[in-house]
Image (cartoon, rainbow, N blue to C red):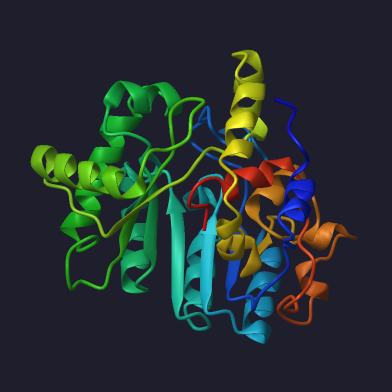
Amino acid sequence: MKMDHFNKTLTRHDLRLTRDETAILQINVGLLCNQKCRHCHLDAGPHRPENMDRATAGQVVAYAERSGFDIVDITGGAPELNPNLEYLVERLSEVASHIMLRSNLSVLGSGQKDRLIEKLASHRVAVVASFPSIDELQTDAQRGDGVFESSIGVLQKLNRIGYGQEGSGLELNLVVNPTGAFLPPSQEQTAKRFRDVLKRRWGITFNQLFSFANVPIGRFRRWLMDSGNFEAYMEKLARAFNPCAVEGVMCRTLVSVAWDGYLYDCDFNLAKRIPMGGRKKVHVSEMPGKPAPGGSIATADHCYTCTAGVGFT
């Protein structure tokens, strides 16, 4: 099957992808990471030098203050490895009603990050933890030897201080990605299975689970190409296109800022260095406020990932 371009698919369904009211500021603080995951769309790893400095972090805080974002979503790389993370959490908690931190869990495994965990808890930062499988071999194959055991230990540590516990106000959510060239199963079924197994085997509880397809860019794209799975995977995504998912995709209500301060429509476009709206690059210091509703969103064929099945919201 020859795949049409994503924009052609939108046109065929009489759809346009434009901005709604922007409520979420996503901050990618850099590509430095303690892991080198096979599915990473950003090519993050231990030797990546990209990391947000204090001056840029201050400009991001100023942008959040003048724009009044409801939600802040901090990601990486492993954002815990950025020395300005605590500064961002403290300052942004004065602005936004809800802060999320995306974690690979293993980076929090050493006692060196216990102070950071306490800081996250004191500011009621929701932890969104990447945890691909309840099978140790599958997780370690995707993320590296020993990652599964370390992740289990961190989930237990977070539970002990209240994360994922009913009534604590400390939110612990899991994100599951397939470990191969296939689309994820039912999110509801996956959540039930994870909840049952994690509780029974390790006493772990969590709030919500989100199951997302892997985006065919970066390291995952290279793995697909090397394994001969790229064309078949892209066709799976295209065949799974759901017109109803377009309305709820995250780029309609989100703006993403990179470690160097430049703005993008989402973290996937950031990875591809496609500027916000597909136009000239705009620095966060130049932006007077939130992107206006109705503005264009830059698209490419990796956008099929966010509209496959129930979508990527």
- Where is residue 154 drawn, in percent x and y? 27, 45
Q: Residue furthest right?
A: 280
| Residue that appears at 38% across and 38% down | 185
On the picture, is 117 further left or further right than 53?
Answer: left
- Does any portion of residue 82 appear in the rendered image? yes
In front here: 261 or 142?
A: 142
- Above or below, 37 against 269 in this view is above
Q: Residue furthest top?
A: 227
Image quarter of residue 28: bottom right
- Above or below, 140 against 91 in this view is above
- Above or below, 254 against 178 in this view is below
- Where is residue 248 drawn, in percent x and y? 56, 64
On the picture, is 30 further left or further right than 86?
Answer: right
On the picture, is 217 further left or further right than 157?
Answer: right
- Does any portion of residue 41 appear in the rendered image? no
Image quarter of residue 32: top right
| Residue that appears at 57% across and 71% down | 24
| Residue that appears at 17% across and 68% down | 166
| Residue that appears at 23% across and 60% down | 164
Image quarter of residue 45: top right
- Where is residue 127 drawn, in percent x and y? 37, 58
Q: Which quarter of the rendering shows the N terminus?
A: top right
